């Protein structure tokens, strides 16, 4: 695992819901991140796959879940079709920390290990900002997020073959 650094990507939002409501919404990745997820991202120690077209493939594992307070997924493997160093996201962590603020909930998202030195940083930080500040926030508060839509029937094995990832995936 890469160590948490002061320059990890972090974004904070405040929502008009309880920590319990926010926690449940965060765990529902299909509601705010992507409908293209195979597996169960809500179960501790389970591995699941995410993909966005032929641009991004990611394998994640839920490693920590503290009810209404914290969710952590580790990136077990990752592939972007637009960068050279395919290890940039590997072993990084997606961390959501929740705290009650009077009648609201503050959520801090940190992509631990994703730093400004990464080739993908500009694109990835823009994407995370949109997902967290818009899609997740709206999903928590209204029940309607803006996840990537489902593209087809399940995880596309052709993408894995196209990018020669059989040995990794």
Image (cartoon, rainbow, N blue to C red):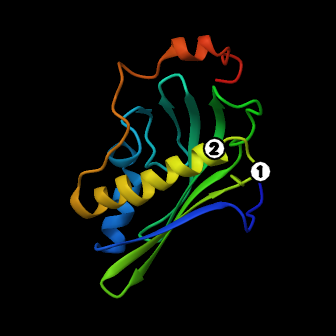
Above or below for 26 versus 150: below
Q: Secondary structure at mark 1?
A: loop
The residue drawn where x is 54% and y is 16% is 159
Q: Say which element carries label 2.
A: strand
Quadrant assignment for the C terminus = top right
Tell me which label, 1 or 2, sits earlier in the chain.
2
Whether tag 1 and tag 2 are in contact, CB under 8 A, the answer is: no
Residue found at x 60% / y 11%? 162
Residue for badge 1: 117
**Residue lying at 35% horizontally and 61% vertically, measured from the top left:** 137
Counting the numbered discs, the total is: 2
* Image mark for residue 13: none
Nearest the camera: 113 or 117? 117
Location of residue 16 by image quarter: bottom left
Q: Residues within 10 Å of mark 1 (few under 14, many from 20)?
A: few
Q: Quadrant of residue 88?
A: top right
The image position of residue 71, as x and y in percent, is 51, 60
Image location (x, y in percent) of residue 33: 41, 45
Residue 165, x across and y down, in percent: 67, 19
17 with respect to 120 (left or right):
left
Instruction: Quadrant for residue 141, please give it.
Output: bottom left
Gap between marks 1 and 2 measured at Cα? 18 Å
Q: Nearer the viewer, residue 148 or 42?
A: 148
Q: Residue 77: percent from the left, percent from the top?
A: 66, 35
Crowd class of label 2 (few under 14; some 14 to 19; many from 20; radius 10 Å): many
* 96 or 144, nearer to the observer: 144
Question: Does 61 sit above or below residue 153?
Answer: below
Residue hosting label 2: 75
């Amino acid at each position: 695992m890469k160590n948490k650094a002061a320059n990890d990507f972090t974004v904070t939002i405040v929502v008009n819901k309880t920590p319990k409501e926010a926690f449940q919404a965060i765990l529902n990745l299909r509601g705010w991140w992507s409908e293209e997820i195979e597996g169960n991202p809500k179960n501790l120690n389970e591995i699941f796959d995410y993909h966005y077209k032929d641009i991004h493939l990611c394998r994640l594992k839920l490693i920590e879940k503290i009810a209404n307070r914290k969710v952590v997924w580790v990136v077990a493997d990752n592939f972007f079709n637009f960068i050279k160093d395919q290890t940039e996201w590997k072993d990084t962590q997606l961390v959501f920390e929740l705290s009650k603020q009077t009648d609201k909930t503050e959520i801090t998202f940190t992509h631990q290990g994703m730093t400004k030195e990464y080739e993908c940083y500009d694109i990835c930080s823009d994407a995370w900002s949109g997902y967290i500040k818009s899609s997740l926030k709206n999903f928590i508060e209204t029940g309607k997020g803006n996840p990537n839509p489902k593209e087809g029937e399940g995880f596309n094995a052709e993408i894995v073959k196209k990018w020669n990832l059989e040995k990794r995936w």
